[in-house]
Amino acid sequence: QSALTQSASVSGSPGQSITISCTGTSSDIGGYDYVSWYQQHPGKAPKLMIFDVSNRPSGVSDRFSGSKSGYTASLTISGLQAEDEADYYCSSYTTSNTPGVIFGGGTKLTVL
Amino acid sequence: EVQLVESGGGLVKPGGSLRLSCVGSGFTFSNAWMTWIRQAPGKGLEWVGRIKSRYDGGTRDYAAPVKDRFTISRDDSKNTVYLEMSSLKTEDTAVYYCTTVRSITSCGHWGQGTLVTVSS
C-alpha cells in the first residue's frame, strides 16, 4: 500500500505558525480517527506528539495541535521555536490490503 | 520511567535470519501492546507489525512486505518482545525500533533502535 502523502518540506520563522498536511484515502485517514504525528530529530528515535487525531500525550507542548477533515489530517505548530526543527511523520490505521498502520513520507520543518 | 532497549542487530547475508529482542521496564509489560517499526537509512518510518497483550488475545498483525518472513512474539515473564526475521533481503536493511502502543495504533514510547544490515 502507498504511504500517506506529506509535503517534503515546510519552513517558518520563530514565533510563526505552520501547518503540515497528511493526505490519505477512505481506507485510512478518511475512515478512522486513528491519526498520529511524530517528531524526529536527526539521529534520535521518533517522539509521539499527537494521537487519535487531536490528543496530546502528557508533556507535549500545547503549541502542537492536530485536526482532520475528510481524507486530510493536519499538524499545526504555533509559536515556532528553534527546537521544533525536525522531521515530522503522520500515521494512520489502515484497512487497505492488510490491516495495520501506514506512515507518511515525512516533512522536514526548517525554522528560519 | 518507561524504557525500551533493543538488541540483536548486526550484519547478515541475504537469505539469512536474525532475532531482535526488546526489553521493557517502567510499565506493566504484560498489559502492553507492542510494535516494531523500521527506518531504512535516510528514509521514512515503516510499520513492521504488532502484538497485542495476552489479555487481548495476543493477536499478531504484520505489514505486507514482511508477512510470512517475520514473526513477533513475547515473553511476559522476561518483559521482552521479539522480532524473528528470516529470508532477509537487502531492502530489510534498517534501524528497527520497538515501541509501546497507545490507543490502538499510535506508538507511545520508543526504544533507541538497533541497526540491521543485510548485505553480502
Image: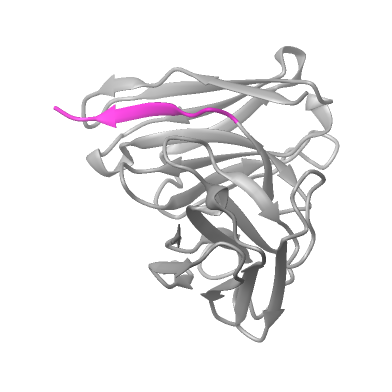
Observer able to see residue A46: yes
Q: Residue at x 78, y 36 (%)?
A: B53
Image vertical order of residue A47 relative to residue B86, above or below: below
Q: What is the residue that sits farthest to the top in this orientation?
A: B78
Name the quarter where the C terminus of chain B is drawn.
top left
Judging from the image, the colouring scheme is one colour
Q: Position of residue A3 (x, y in %)?
A: 44, 66
Residue at point 78% right, 25% down? B29
Seen in the image, is A41 located left or right of residue B91?
right
Indicate the position of residue A39 as horizontal and vertical percent values: 56, 50
Q: Is residue A1 visible?
A: no
- On screen, residue A13 versus residue B28, left or right, reads left
Give the vertical position of B79 relative to A12 (above or below): above
Q: In the image, is residue A20 part of the stretch drawn in magenta?
A: no
Most extreme residue toward the bottom is A70
Pick whichever, A71 or B48, lies toward us.
A71
Question: Looking at the rendering, which quadrant does residue A76 occupy?
Answer: bottom right
Count of labels in the image: 0
Residue B98 percent across, percent down from the top left: 58, 33
Quarter occupied by residue B108 = top right
**Residue placed furthest toward the left:** B120
Q: Residue at position x 26%, y 23% from top?
A: B12
Q: Tell me the quarter of the image containing the N terminus of chain B.
A: top right
**B70 or A74: which is nearer to us?**
A74
What residue appears at the point 74 percent right and 26 percent down from the top-left corner? B2
Residue A52 in percent (x, y) is at 75, 63
Report the span colored magenta. B111-120
